[in-house]
């Protein structure tokens, strides 16, 4: 989401595009691509190639967020640490791209306004800024995936918030920051686990990281960390993603939330295994 897409104070067509967006407290359920790959996605091209993740996963080049968060010399929006992205066609651009911005479901303030996602043109300009060569006909599908991942991340945050206070008013996304290339402590731990037991744990780092600042009812702000992972693709080549969303360990309250969630998961696993063993013993 950009100035409005990810988290901005006021929607603006000239506002920076950004992903505010696990993706969940657990990474046990990968998020599937929302794009149907049975037929070509609607775009300016009739390409039959399945939609691809906008992140490069080549071993030779570290995967990064396509949105530049720290452009040297550019004035950054304090709400998302991004420069403004133009709605004008980029140099050498061959096909026209839509400039309409989709409104997210993510509240931005108490007034009821929502964050806006970047337009396909803004998203393409962000890719160009990063030096990525991306065919224009794939950009609209990439934007759909980007927006969908943000929505999934927000749903995971709401799950955490409902557990903390089921009766509270829905929180707002106050601001966010993309931190590509910065591994969270948890991501480092899982990479170490993968190094020790590669057959059991993932050995690939997350392709992106975001920090979202959520404002609760009453004004309290809580930081959430979101690690974005790529999961094995579907048989037809459709991309699959896994989001690890959780409260940062910045306060006693967040630490209690994380411990409670881990305890509940461990207890649920124990009960399932116990029930399975009891069922087998009766046959």
Image (cartoon, helix red, strand yellow):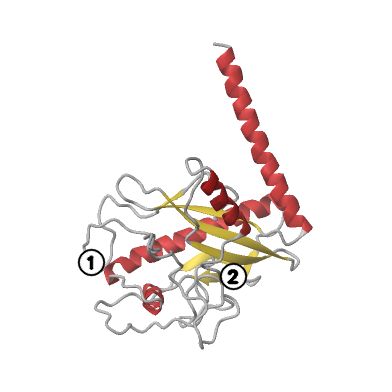
Residue 165 can be seen, yes or no: no
Residue farthest along the front direction in this orientation: 196
Residue nearer the viewer, 168 or 14: 14
Q: Residue at x 46, y 83 (%)?
A: 14
Residue on which disc 1 sits: 45
**Which dot, 2 or 1, sits closer to the camera?**
2
Quadrant holding the C terminus = top right
Residue 191 versus residue 84 in the image, above or below? above
Local SS, label 1: loop
Residue on which disc 2 sits: 176
- First in sequence, mark 2 or 1: give its number: 1
Judge the density around disc 2: few (<14), some (14-19), many (≥20) Cα neighbours within 10 Å: many
Residue 55 can be seen, yes or no: yes
On screen, residue 106 versus residue 50, left or right, reads right
Residue farthest along the top direction in this orientation: 283
Q: Residue at x 61, y 23 (%)?
A: 275
Judge the density around disc 1: few (<14), some (14-19), many (≥20) Cα neighbours within 10 Å: few
Q: Position of residue 153 (x, y in %)?
A: 54, 58
- Picture quarter containing residue 226? bottom right
On screen, residue 46 versus residue 91, left or right, reads left
Q: Residue at x 31, y 75 (%)?
A: 97
Residue 71 versus residue 67 in the image, above or below? below
For the residues labelled 2 and 1, the Cα–Cα distance comes to: 33 Å
Q: Position of residue 112 (x, y in %)?
A: 61, 69
On screen, residue 217 versus residue 69, left or right, reads right
Q: Position of residue 265 (x, y in %)?
A: 64, 40
Residue nearer the viewer, 222 or 105: 222
């Amino acid at each position: 989401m950009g100035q409005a897409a990810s988290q901005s104070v006021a929607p603006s067509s000239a506002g920076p595009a950004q992903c505010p967006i696990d993706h969940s407290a657990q990474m046990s359920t990968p998020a599937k691509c929302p794009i149907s790959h049975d037929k070509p996605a609607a775009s300016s091209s009739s390409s039959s190639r399945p939609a691809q993740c906008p992140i490069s996963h080549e071993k030779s080049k570290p995967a990064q967020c396509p949105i530049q968060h720290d452009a040297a010399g550019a004035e950054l929006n304090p709400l998302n640490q991004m420069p403004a992205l133009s709605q004008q066609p980029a140099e050498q651009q061959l096909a026209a791209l839509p400039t309409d911005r989709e409104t997210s479901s993510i509240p931005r303030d108490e007034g009821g306004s929502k964050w806006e996602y970047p337009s396909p043109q803004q998203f393409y300009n962000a890719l160009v800024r990063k030096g990525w060569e991306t065919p224009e006909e794939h950009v609209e599908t990439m934007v759909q995936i980007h927006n969908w991942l943000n929505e999934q991340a927000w749903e995971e945050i709401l799950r955490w918030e409902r557990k903390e206070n089921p009766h509270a008013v829905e929180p707002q996304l106050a601001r966010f920051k993309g931190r590509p290339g910065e591994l969270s402590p948890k991501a480092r731990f899982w990479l170490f686990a993968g190094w020790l037991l590669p057959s059991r744990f993932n050995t690939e780092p997350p392709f992106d990281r975001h920090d979202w600042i959520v404002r609760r009812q009453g004004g309290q702000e809580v930081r959430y960390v979101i690690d974005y992972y790529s999961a094995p693709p579907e048989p037809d080549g459709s991309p699959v993603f896994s989001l690890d969303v959780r409260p940062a360990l910045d306060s006693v309250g967040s630490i209690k939330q994380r411990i409670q969630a881990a305890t509940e998961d461990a207890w649920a696993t124990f009960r399932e295994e116990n029930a399975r063993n009891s069922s087998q013993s009766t046959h």
